[in-house]
Amino acid sequence: MSTEASGLSRLSVNQETVRQWSLPQLAEGCAKAGLSQVGLWRAPVQEYGVERAGQLMKDTGLTVTSLCRGGFLTASDPAGRARALDDNRAAVDEAVGVNTDTLVLVSGGLPEGDKDLYGARERIADALAELAPYAAERGVRLAIEPLHPMFASDRCVVSTLSQALDIAERFPAEQVGVVVDTYHVWWDDRAPEQIARAGAAGRIHSFQLADWITPLPAGVLVGRGQLGDGSVDFRAIRRHVEATGFDGPIEVEIFNEGLWARDGGDVVAEVAARYLEHAC
């Protein structure tokens, strides 16, 4: 059965879901499973070689739906700001190298001793004023990903789609949009209206799935659940996203040590089955 016939044509497996796999294993395993799309992360791509990674995916017939991650743009000191801008320009170039048009941005937390969330968000917008034209010239869209509020202090001061859109809307939609990640937005009762707001302007640049499971582990970053194991109504969120006309890839991105300890092929097969069961 073809991927399209099986309902998996839009499924993209993010590299972090099967972190135990090398890039060649990811390419081979996803192709073997009949999948045609993957999301990549910068560190393993850099280790393998950017151009080499792009060629590997191309040779395997895989489309790279996103590269994660740029961002961390909240530094208040000039040296920190300059380093962040340089790193994000490099991330844009790497996105070009792996043949994706979408760079996911995790905006950054509060600098040490700083309590000004508004000021930190303004610094993100200031940085994007420099980065968005650079990315656009290279055919790369920047996608601001709001993270759950528990990450606001150390990882991402952008906690809601509303906050992400307030920044993104300062720039052309083809340059800056948002990520709708179920793990981070499922709890927000304003998410449906903000999804509609993003979609109406063509700003949904990435749609990602992971479940919310409790209790959270001590390392909350790796507390995402396999689809169907937690509290997220994937079909409801997908309906809201697709009501805007979005018909792009749907990326499953799960950070979970239990999944990483298993056979990667089994994990990918389970992801595909759970996607069909809970998100289609």
Image (cartoon, grey):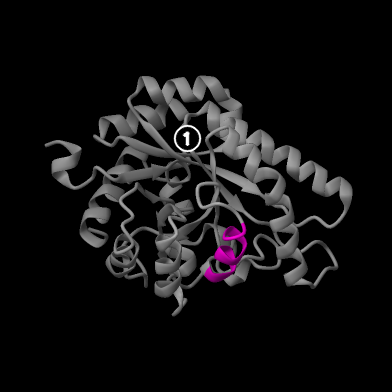
In magenta stretch: residue 63: no
- Give the amino acid type for the residue marked by disc 1 in the picture: Thr
Determine the main secondary structure of the stretch shown in magenta: helix
Look at the numbered disc 1 and give the secondary structure of its residue.
loop
In magenta stretch: residue 165: yes
Residue beneath the point at 46% across and 70% down? 194
> In this rendering, is residue 23 above or below 80?
above
Judge from the rendering whether residue 146 lies leftward or rightward of residue 56; answer left or right. right
Spot the residue most to the right. Answer: 78
Q: How many callouts does the rendering have? A: 1
> In this rendering, is residue 196 above or below 79?
below
Q: Evaluate whether residue 55 shows in this view.
A: yes
Q: Evaluate whether residue 147 shows in this view.
A: no
User: Dot 1, crowdedness within 10 Å: few (<14), some or many (≥20)?
Assistant: many
> In this rendering, is residue 229 above or below 134?
below
Image x and y of residue 31, in percent: 29, 30
Residue at image mark 1: 100
Image x and y of residue 185, in percent: 47, 69
Q: Which residues are magenta?
A: 162-170
Image x and y of residue 168, in percent: 58, 58
Residue beneath the point at 48% across and 73% down? 215
Q: Quadrant of residue 63?
A: top left
Image x and y of residue 188, in percent: 47, 76
Judge from the rendering whether residue 118 lies leftward or rightward of residue 68; answer left or right. right
User: Where is the N terminus found, in terms of image quarters?
Assistant: top left
Q: Quadrant of residue 35?
A: top left
User: Where is the C terminus found, in terms of image quarters?
Assistant: bottom left
Residue beneath the point at 64% across and 41% down? 133
Residue beneath the point at 45% across and 63% down? 198
Along the viewing direction, whichever of 60 and 139 lies nearer the viewer: 139
Along the viewing direction, whichever of 199 and 226 lies nearer the viewer: 199
Spot the residue most to the bottom. Answer: 189
